[in-house]
Amino acid sequence: MSQKKYTINFSNVKYYMEMHKIIQVSLDFPDYYGCNWDAFWDCLTDMYGEPIFIEIIGLDVIEREFEDAAEKMISILRRFKHYESSFEKDIQIEIVSSNRHICLE
């Protein structure tokens, strides 16, 4: 099974709901995505079973614009990566921003 690549680009985001819409479109989340962190977790866990690579660009923008949003997202992605140990090897998450480069392990 080939790895599916998703890119979330926050480089030009200006509004909190816009951030969640970018997440929804970038990760092919369903129309009923609730645009909140609980819904983010729920939709992520629906992705288990397929090898995926998630690249996040512009994390520094949401760090600057939306207090705690970047930290919350990283926390959820880290939890997702390790939620089911049998899928851990199939999930890669890389965060690229102007001030740092993070590869979640």
Image (cartoon, grey):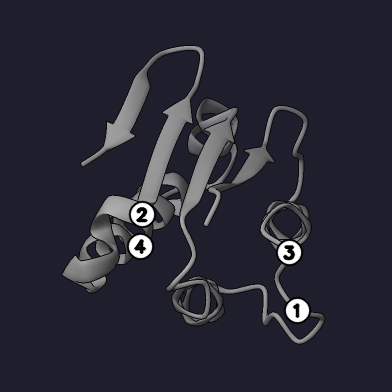
Residue where numbered disc 1 is placed: 30
* Pointers 3 and 4 in contact (C-beta within 8 Å): no
- Residue 96 in the image, given as x and y percentages of width and height: 48, 23
> Could you say which quadrant of the image residue 9 lies in?
top right
Q: CA distance from mark 3 to mark 4?
A: 17 Å
Residue drawn at x 43%, y 73% as measured from the top left? 48
| Residue sitting at the far top | 98
Q: Nearer the viewer, residue 102 or 38?
A: 102
Q: Name the element at disc 3.
A: loop
Q: Is residue 40 left or right of residue 9?
A: left
Q: CA distance from mark 3 to mark 1?
A: 6 Å
The quadrant the C terminus occupies is top left
* Pointers 4 and 2 in contact (C-beta within 8 Å): no
Return the mark for residue 76. 4
Return the mark for residue 51. none
Residue where numbered disc 2 is placed: 90
* Pointers 2 and 1 in contact (C-beta within 8 Å): no
Sequence-first tag of 1 and 4: 1
Sequence-first tag of 4 and 2: 4
Q: Residues within 10 Å of mark 3 (few under 14, many from 20)?
A: few
